[in-house]
Image: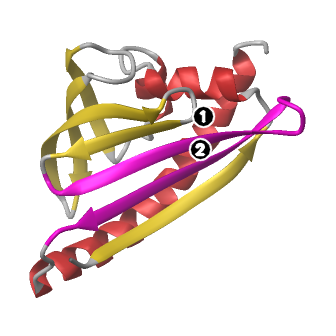
Amino acid sequence: MATQKFSVSKLIHSPAKVVYSIIADYNNGHPMILPKPPFVSLEVEKGGTGAGTEMIVKIEMFGKIQSYRAVVSEPDPGQVLVETANTGYITTFIVEQCDNGKNSYVTFTTKLTENLGLMKKIEFWFTSKLLRPVYKKELEKLAEVADSTGH
């Protein structure tokens, strides 16, 4: 089974606990870091904090508003959070503590693991080109929100 993926990382000058709590809070924190555009909305259907959260996300891509459903899991609570979308895309958020807990190294990785036909490979290539700068902006917003919490 083929896998395609891309990642974006950033050092954030806030403790890992603060950073992770923003990412895992789908009612308030996570929506604050989503760049608009291309993100249009994030609607929590179930849960809202970490594992078990179910949501509908709307994003404008390729000139159209597209929606997808995603479910959140936490294979390593406090450090790794995973969104599995009904599109086949899996996005992992990794928050690593560094500098004796004063800072965090955060990585967003999106991958597609399934039988990749030519059209899906082409779609993923375009999606990765569009989302890479979006993820960079999202990490910048994450740093701003974490900094404003007054850690």
Q: Is residue 82 visible?
A: yes
How are the residues colored? secondary structure
Q: Where residue 51 appears, x then y in whole percent?
A: 34, 24
**From this viewpoint, which residue is outermost toward the right?**
100
- The answer to whether residue 98 is left or right of residue 58 is right
Which mark, by number, is residue 139?
2
Secondary structure state at the residue bearing disc 2: helix
Q: Split into 4 quadrants, where in the image is the C terminus?
A: top right
Is residue 147 found inside the magenta-colored segment of the image? no
Q: Residue at x 51, y 63 (%)?
A: 7
Q: Where residue 37 appears, x then y in whole percent?
A: 36, 44
Q: Where residue 32 appears, x then y in whole percent?
A: 47, 25
- Identity of the amino acid at label 2? Leu
Which mark, by number, is residue 13?
none
Q: Which residues are magenta?
A: 87-114
Q: Nearer the viewer, residue 38 or 48?
A: 48
**From this viewpoint, which residue is outermost toward the bottom?**
118
Is 52 located above or below residue 7 in the figure? above
- Label 1 and label 2: CA atoms lie apart by 5 Å
Quarter occupied by residue 78: top right
- The answer to whether residue 51 is left or right of residue 132 is left
Is 117 located above or below residue 9 in the figure? below
Magenta portion: prevailing SS class: strand
The residue carrying mark 1 is 142
- Identity of the amino acid at label 1? Leu
Q: Split into 4 quadrants, where in the image is the N terminus?
A: bottom left
Circles 1 and 2, Cβ within 8 Å, touching? The answer is yes
Q: Nearer the viewer, residue 130 or 80?
A: 80
